[in-house]
Image: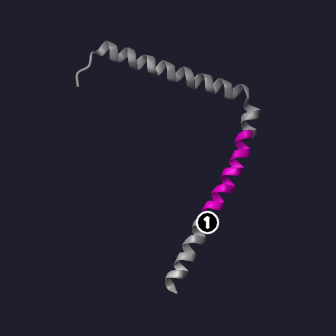
Amino acid sequence: MRLPALPVALSIATASGIWFAFVTWVAFRAGSNWDVLYATIVRYGKIAAIAGFCIVAAIVAIYFFRRRNRAA
């Protein structure tokens, strides 16, 4: 695949510029609202941990239920 170097380089440079501008903006916003962001992360982290535990417990219960029914 032969592509012209200058248009490809300009396209890549533009995409990279947009991406890094977005990442910089997100980092700036996160830093300026760190207390709110941290509290949100902690709250949803606890919810995710509880949900994960429930999912694992359900999978283990289903496994043992099916195993017991196969033996019978």
- Element at label 1: helix
Report the span colored magenta.
40-57
Q: Is residue 44 above or below residue 18?
A: below
**Quadrant location of residue 64?**
bottom right
- The residue sitting at 61% across, 60% down in the picture is 55
Which image quadrant: the N terminus?
A: top left
Q: Amino acid at mark 1?
A: Ala
Can residue 51 be found in the magenta stretch? yes
**Quadrant location of residue 28?**
top right
Instruction: From the top left corner, tell me how far across and down residue 12 is, in percent.
Output: 40, 20
Query: Farthest left residue?
Result: 2
Q: Is residue 11 above or below residue 66?
A: above
**Where is mark 1, residue-wise?**
58
- The residue sitting at 72% across, 25% down in the picture is 32
**Quadrant location of residue 37?**
top right
Can residue 21 be found in the magenta stretch? no
